[in-house]
Image (cartoon, rainbow, N blue to C red):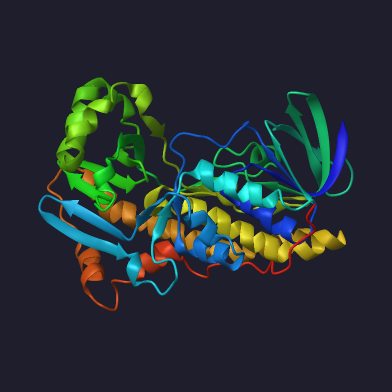
């Protein structure tokens, strides 16, 4: 079976979903292919930053999204022993949304895709796994769409533009021949959730906890605490050999407020292992195909910016590509313009993550008594500097705002 569309987006993560929504609002015929049959994944990132909330507010969606149960992160705090240091204070940002909203990603994606469904030019196909690209044999190897498989068999979807938004292990990126350049990422993370009591809604435990050569990141969901137990790269088997009891003891010592519930970690299957990567591809495009989000640049989990940079890529792509897609004239130069727009912010935030990893994470894991570096202490205390980390994490540099002011046709 073969059909056609203007834009085929592969991957129903935040970048792909937002791009589909924005293009559909402008009347661009768009098909979103998602390999899974639902959006529910364990331990996906939940952070929605002020830059994303402002963009959604431009579309009239932020208030509706925040009407749903969610947590709010207003400060990034590092606690080591009896010392507590505020590394970033989002409440000081000049925005309607001076916080990071903690929203389960499955709910966020369902919200965005359901909004996109209100436009007749949008189609989402769940359980659709891409198997190959359709490439013109002659000429410059122009990509003309994808072949995919679902429960009903094999299909062809021809498109002016195919967007790889299928994450850090992007299959479309591989099929297109894009090669990644890795950056250093000398850590891995073991994610676990602990129950959050009703009377803890006003308690702020979020931030970094450091001690005894260990580091735990605590994040607040509406009904549970999400903990990232940070370990040295490649030490997963050492941690497992020490046993679950040792892991529970270390988590309890670093986050004593939650010591009464670490017993709920009763199997290794309760723990999601994340092999931390950081990389990017030198060129995000070739004729007929564009990579965005983790397909173009894999982010470290530091500061939780990966979701929001994927969304920023999507906004930039929609702003630049909607008109040529409507006119049927999208070119490789248009795709290059998207990368040109987004490459500097991407390089900057990856460099920022590397600095945080070197100054905080590496020091926390080296086994010696931890002391926050002088540079970090100065940034946290000097009035002219202390807003900078929150600005970088919450906004980035050159945040994107949507140009989609007119809505496309609805059913």
Q: Is residue 330 visible?
A: no
Q: Is residue 291 above or below residue 315?
A: above
User: Farthest residue in the left direction?
Assistant: 82
Q: Position of residue 98 (x, y in %)?
A: 39, 66
* Residue at 32%, 21% in the rendered image: 267
Q: Quadrant of the N terminus?
A: top right
Q: Nearer the viewer, residue 316 or 332?
A: 316
Q: Nearer the viewer, residue 313 or 19?
A: 19
Q: Position of residue 292 (x, y in %)?
A: 62, 52
Q: Nearer the viewer, residue 403 or 63?
A: 63
Q: Position of residue 152 (x, y in %)?
A: 78, 24
Quadrant position of residue 38: top right
* Residue at 40%, 58% in the rendered image: 100
* Residue at 33%, 61% in the rendered image: 74
Q: Nearer the viewer, residue 219 or 221?
A: 221
User: Farthest residue in the bottom direction?
Assistant: 384
* Tally of marks: 0
Q: Is residue 385 above or below residue 342?
A: below
* Residue at 22%, 26% in the rendered image: 263
Q: Is residue 377 above or below residue 354?
A: below
Q: Is residue 68 above or below residue 214?
A: below
User: Farthest residue in the right direction?
Assistant: 138
Q: Position of residue 409 (x, y in %)?
A: 80, 58
Q: Is residue 299 visible?
A: yes
Quadrant position of residue 186: top left
Say left or right for 170 vs 302.
right
């Amino acid at each position: 079976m073969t059909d056609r569309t203007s834009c085929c987006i592969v991957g129903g993560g935040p970048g792909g979903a937002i791009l589909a929504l924005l293009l559909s609002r402008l009347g661009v015929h768009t098909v979103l292919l998602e390999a899974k049959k639902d959006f529910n994944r364990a331990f996906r990132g939940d952070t929605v930053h002020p830059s994303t909330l402002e963009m959604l507010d431009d579309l009239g969606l932020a208030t509706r999204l925040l009407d749903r149960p969610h947590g709010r992160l207003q400060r990034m705090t590092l606690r080591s022993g009896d010392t507590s240091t505020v590394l970033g204070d989002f409440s000081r940002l000049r925005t309607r949304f001076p916080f990071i909203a903690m929203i389960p990603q499955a709910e966020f994606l369902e919200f965005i895709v359901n909004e996109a469904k209100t436009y007749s030019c949008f189609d989402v196909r769940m359980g659709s796994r891409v198997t190959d690209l359709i490439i013109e044999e002659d000429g410059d190897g122009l990509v003309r769409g994808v072949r995919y498989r679902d429960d009903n068999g094999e299909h062809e979807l021809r498109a002016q533009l195919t967007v790889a938004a299928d994450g850090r292990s992007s299959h479309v990126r591989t099929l297109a021949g894009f090669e990644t350049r890795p950056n250093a990422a000398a850590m891995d993370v073991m994610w676990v959730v602990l129950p959050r009591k009703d009377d803890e809604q006003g308690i702020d435990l979020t931030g970094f906890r450091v001690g005894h050569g260990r580091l735990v990141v605590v994040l607040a969901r509406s009904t549970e605490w999400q903990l990232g137990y940070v370990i040295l790269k490649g030490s997963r088997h050492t941690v497992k050999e020490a046993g679950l009891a040792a892991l529970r003891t270390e988590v309890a010592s670093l986050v004593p407020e939650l010591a009464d519930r670490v017993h709920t970690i009763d199997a290794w299957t309760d723990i999601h292992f994340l092999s931390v990567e950081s990389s990017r591809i030198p060129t995000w495009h070739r004729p007929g195909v564009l990579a965005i989000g983790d397909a173009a640049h894999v982010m470290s989990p530091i500061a939780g910016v990966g979701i929001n940079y994927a969304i920023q890529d999507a906004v930039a792509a929609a702003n630049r590509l909607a008109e040529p897609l409507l006119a049927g004239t999208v070119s490789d130069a248009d795709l290059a313009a998207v990368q040109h727009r987004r490459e500097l912010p991407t390089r900057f935030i990856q460099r920022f993550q590397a600095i945080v990893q070197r100054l905080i994470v590496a020091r926390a894991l080296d086994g010696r008594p931890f002391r926050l570096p002088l540079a970090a202490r100065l940034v946290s205390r000097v009035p002219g500097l202390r807003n900078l980390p929150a600005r970088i994490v919450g906004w980035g540099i050159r945040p994107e705002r949507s140009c989609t002011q007119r809505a496309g046709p609805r059913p």
